[in-house]
């Protein structure tokens, strides 16, 4: 909502958003608009007290009548554009896609040159984003996670769910059918209203807000129902391992890595290999190589990273440049894998030499 727009404009925007599935042809069935948090961004002139008052009143009216939150941004500020104010160059985002990068390069220099904004406006944008994330988005995600946990996850923790022995005695008519569909290219996907889709979203959102214990429990439960969907099963096993490495069960021990984490990773890699998805297979091993290297006990975890990196090289599926980067990472692995006992012995020996009296002339 910009300068000159009113409550009616905000209401019309919200109605259009809520009915996008009616306006857009071939609207993705895996997208649920009710799980998306709508937020209004209200922009005003910071030098105008009248506009600020109108903006604050509009925030209250939108929340009272539309039940939607808003954030304000003083975008226009004559003092920010003065000659004395400092400017900052806007760089490309870190996660820019290849298509976006090529588009930026192909544009004329006058268009693709350095974009600058006043430092005061950049600070205002960062403050607004901080409010958006910590006061609106994360609390919304926590409410959704709690709701999905109570309505979907908790009933699945019964004695009968996931138990193959008891499933034999359950009437097939009472079993919930998995709601999925096939796209034009034959890819099977889940409906946005299916339990499998919502549980995956519950697990992914838990990872995002660092609730790794909830994420691990959900991925582990969901994996029991995805035996007939290999790629989805492999993805669940993969992120189940990530949750454990991130601390889902307190401290990561050698026994846990050997008995719990690596079997899940190896099974996911085998599924990707069987399904002929070499990119997924390589990405999976590369991800866990980096996670193992991030653990504090490098003497224990580095061999696992070396194993996955060497497996990637031995498969011979990478181009020369990618292979070079993997070789560089391997050299870092070998240089960091030093027995901590060696350092202790070296320090003791060095201290003993410093304390020993010098020989007589």
Image: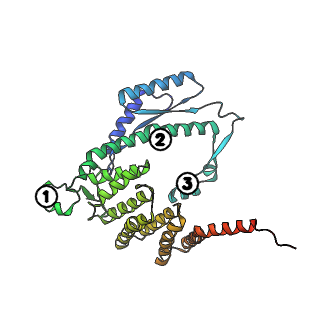
Query: Would residue 221 be seen by someone viewing this image from the given angle?
Result: yes
Tell me where residue 9 sits by quadrant.
Answer: top left
Identify the residue position indicated by label 3 in the image. 94
Count residues near mark 1 (Cα–Cα under 10 Å), then give few for <14, some for 14-19, many for 20+: few
In percent of the image, x 66 and y 69: which residue is there? 346
| Position of residue 120 measured from the top left corner of the image (x, y, whole percent) | 63, 36
SS for callout 3: loop
Identify the residue position indicated by label 2 in the image. 133
SS for callout 1: loop
Q: From mark 3 to mark 1, how far is it between C-alphas?
A: 51 Å
Name the side, left or right, on which 113 lies relative to 201.
Answer: right
**Numbered badge on residue 239:** none
Question: How many numbered discs sit on the rendered protein?
Answer: 3
Query: Would residue 183 be seen by someone viewing this image from the given angle?
Result: no
In percent of the image, x 44 and y 49: which residue is there? 210
In percent of the image, x 42 and y 33: which residue is there? 69
Label 3 or label 2, whichever lies nearer to me, is 2
Q: Are marks 2 and 1 in contact (CB under 8 Å)?
A: no
Give 62 or 251, whichever is nearer the viewer: 251
| Position of residue 29 measured from the top left corner of the image (x, y, whole percent) | 30, 51
Give 173 or 57, whichever is nearer the viewer: 173
Q: Quadrant of the C terminus?
A: bottom right
Q: From mark 2 to mark 1, how far is it between C-alphas?
A: 45 Å
Q: Are marks 3 and 1 in contact (CB under 8 Å)?
A: no
2 or 1: tag closer to the N-terminus: 2
**Numbered badge on residue 170:** 1
Tell me where residue 182 sits by quadrant.
Answer: bottom left
Count residues near mark 3 (Cα–Cα under 10 Å), then give few for <14, some for 14-19, many for 20+: few
């Amino acid at each position: 909502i910009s300068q000159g727009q009113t409550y009616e404009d905000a209401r019309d925007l919200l109605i259009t958003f809520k009915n996008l599935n009616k306006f857009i042809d071939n609207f993705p069935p895996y997208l649920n608009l009710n799980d998306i948090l709508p937020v209004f961004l209200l922009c005003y002139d910071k030098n105008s007290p009248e506009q600020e008052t109108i903006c604050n009143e509009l925030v209250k009216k939108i929340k009272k009548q539309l039940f939607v939150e808003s954030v304000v941004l003083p975008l226009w500020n004559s003092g920010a554009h003065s000659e004395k104010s400092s400017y900052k160059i806007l760089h490309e985002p870190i996660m820019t896609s290849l298509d976006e990068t090529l588009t930026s390069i192909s544009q004329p220099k006058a268009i693709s040159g350095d974009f600058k904004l006043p430092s005061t406006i950049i600070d205002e944008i960062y403050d607004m984003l901080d409010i958006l994330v910590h006061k609106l988005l994360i609390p919304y995600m926590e409410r959704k996670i709690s709701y999905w946990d109570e309505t979907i996850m908790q009933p699945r923790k019964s004695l009968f769910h996931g138990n193959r022995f008891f499933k034999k005695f359950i009437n097939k008519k009472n079993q919930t059918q998995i709601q999925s569909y096939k796209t034009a290219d034959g890819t099977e996907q889940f409906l946005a209203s299916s339990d499998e889709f919502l549980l995956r979203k519950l697990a992914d959102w838990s990872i995002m807000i660092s609730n790794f214990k909830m994420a691990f429990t959900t991925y582990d439960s969901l994996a029991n129902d995805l035996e007939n969907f290999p790629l989805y099963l492999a993805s669940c096993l993969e992120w189940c391992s990530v949750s454990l490495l991130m601390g889902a069960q307190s401290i990561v021990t050698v026994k846990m890595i050997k008995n719990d984490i690596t079997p899940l990773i190896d099974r996911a890699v085998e599924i990707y290999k069987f399904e002929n998805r070499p990119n997924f297979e390589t990405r999976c091993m590369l991800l866990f190589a980096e996670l193992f290297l991030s653990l504090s006990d490098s003497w224990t975890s580095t061999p696992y990273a070396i194993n996955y990196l060497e497996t990637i090289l031995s498969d011979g599926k990478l181009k020369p440049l990618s292979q070079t980067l993997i070789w560089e990472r391997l050299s870092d692995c070998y240089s960091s894998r030093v027995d901590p006992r060696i350092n202790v012995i070296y320090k003791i020996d060095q201290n003993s030499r410093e304390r020993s009296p010098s020989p007589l002339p």
